Structures are given as C-alpha cells and as structure tokens.
Amino acid sequence: MLLPPERTLFVRGDTPLLLLADAPVHDVLPLLAAPGEAVPVCEGWSIVPRLTLCVVDGPGDHGLVIPAFTAPVLDAADTVPGDMAGWCADAERAGGAVVLSMDRLPEVIDWSALLAPGTSRGGFLPAPA
C-alpha cells in the first residue's frame, strides 16, 4: 500500500522517528505500553529506510511504501528542516526507527503526548541487516 508523503513526518535523532497519519496499517500495529515504560519492539515488523522509498513491512500482507524523497523531514531540534539522507543514516546507526501511527500528524513533537495511551500505535521497527 502506498502512503502519500504528506501523511508522514520523518524526525531525525539518535533514534529516528517516523510518524504516520491515517495509515492503513494503524489497527495492525501494537498498542503502546503504559506511560513510563520503554517503547516496545514491534515483533514481526521491519523498516527499510532508503533515500527514495521507505518500506514499513509487517506480518502477512500488512505494510507500506512511502515515497521518502519528497517526504517532510525535521531535524531532532523539531524546528529546522532536515534531509532524508540524514534520517536514513540515523536509522542505520540505530538499527531501525520508532514508527508511530495516529489519526493525524501533530503540530508539535511532544514525546509524552505521542506516547500517551490511546494516542498512537506502533513501536521500534528494526531494519534488516
């Protein structure tokens, strides 16, 4: 399933973040843990971060392809535009990325709000070696 880049936000950082809005895989991703607990690893899911396309692959027929080259990227500071090559390098160093799916993209990246129960689904998706 192709997810339009305007329904995504790639955020650079030590552990990169990919936000998905109104994604068709939303209900298949796991619920987030209780506040204060670590972001779970999404068993059976993986992410393949590339400059032109980003693939989020789930169990069975579930998955997404995102035209990453035209997708919005923010630097870790959340105020400066970033670049997809940098995000891909962050994901390679981290061995994957945190992928969170929600109804709509937030105006401000607030980790406590994003990780609050009932707000998002997802977790850490490892990148295949």
Image (spheres, helix red, strand yellow):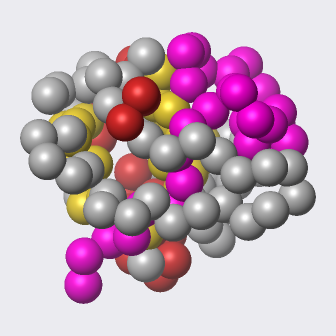
Residue 23, image quadrant: top left
Measuring from the top left, give residue 81's x and y in whole percent: 59, 39
- Closer to the camera in the image, 17 or 58: 58
Main SS of the magenta segment?
loop
Is residue 18 in the magenta section?
no
Q: Position of residue 93 (x, y in %)?
A: 47, 81
Between 37 and 82, the one nearer to me in the picture: 37
Q: Which residues are magenta?
A: 102-129
Q: Residue at x 80, y 49 (%)?
A: 34
Q: Residue at x 64, y 71 (%)?
A: 14
**Where's the C terminus, which quadrant?**
bottom left
> Residue at 80% of width from left, 37% of height from top?
116
The answer to whether residue 53 of the structure is visible from this angle is no
Residue 66 placement (x, y as % from top left):
25, 36
In this rendered view, identify the residue nearer to me: 48 or 6.
Answer: 48
- Image side of residue 117 versus residue 30, left or right: right
Q: Is residue 94 visible?
A: yes
Above or below, 111 relative to 85: above
Residue in front for this viewpoint, 89 or 113: 113
Is residue 110 in the magenta section?
yes
> Is the N terminus in the top left, top right, bottom left or bottom right quadrant?
top left
At 71% from the left and 27% from the top, the residue drawn is 118
User: Looking at the image, how many numbered discs can be counted on the residues?
Assistant: 0
The answer to whether 96 appears left or right of 39 in the picture is: left
